[in-house]
Amino acid sequence: MANNRLINSLSYLSILFLPVLFPLIVWLMTGNNPDAHRTAGRAFWLHLLPTILMIIFLIIFGISGFYLNDVVKSGWIAIIVLPVLALIAIASYLWSLIRGIQYLLAS
């Protein structure tokens, strides 16, 4: 754990400089180091989560727009779902910062 502390921390803190790319590279390069591999994988999926949810929302919003044929109903779906997605994105960002700092401070 102590040897991997910096790379584990950077995997999470990369949300500030390379959100998805850095953890993906570390995840692919550390197959022989289970601790760093697992941490980079978790950071990768944590950074990718808001993007995946936004794509799912856009698909649902598009499908509802076709089937409802009502702009007001589609608008209400967006008004309800977008704040939830924003909260998930903010929580993901903050959790990445917290985990990165925890790995840096771990002894």
Image (spheres, rainbow, N blue to C red):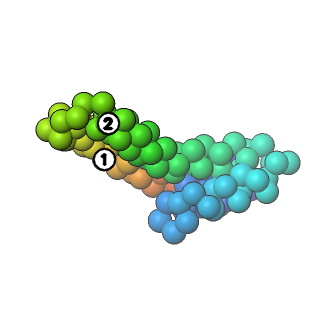
In the picture of the structure, the residue carrying the numbered disc 1 is 86
* Residue at image coords 41%, 52%: 93
Residue furthest right as drawn: 32
Q: In this view, does 88 lie above or below 26?
A: above
Dot 1 amino acid type: Ala
Q: What element carries label 1?
A: helix
Residue furthest left as drawn: 72
In the picture of the structure, the residue carrying the numbered disc 2 is 66
* Residue at image coords 47%, 65%: 16
Q: Distance between the residues labelled 2 and 1?
A: 24 Å
Bin the neighbour count of mark 2 within 10 Å (Cα to Cα): few under 14, some 14-19, many 20 and up: few
Answer with left or right where residue 24 lies relative to residue 104: right
Bin the neighbour count of mark 1 within 10 Å (Cα to Cα): few under 14, some 14-19, many 20 and up: few
Q: In this view, does 84 lie above or below 8?
A: above
* Residue at image coords 63%, 56%: 23
Count of marks overlaid on the render? 2
Residue furthest bottom as drawn: 17
Q: Return the x and y of residue 36 as percentages of the image width and height.
A: 72, 49
* Residue at image coords 78%, 43%: 34
Could you tell which of marks 2 and 1 lies nearer the N-terminus? 2
Please tell me in which quadrant of the rendered image residue 77 appears.
top left
Nearer to us of marks 2 and 1 is: 2
Please tell me in which quadrant of the rendered image residue 69 appears.
top left
Badge 2 vs badge 1, beta-carbon distance below 8 Å = no
Residue 17 or residue 8, whichever sits in front: 17
Dot 2 amino acid type: Phe
Q: Return the x and y of residue 39 as percentages of the image width and height.
A: 65, 46
Q: Is mark 2 on a helix, strand or loop?
A: helix
Q: In this view, does 26 lie above or below 75?
A: below
Answer with left or right where residue 37 lies relative to residue 51: right
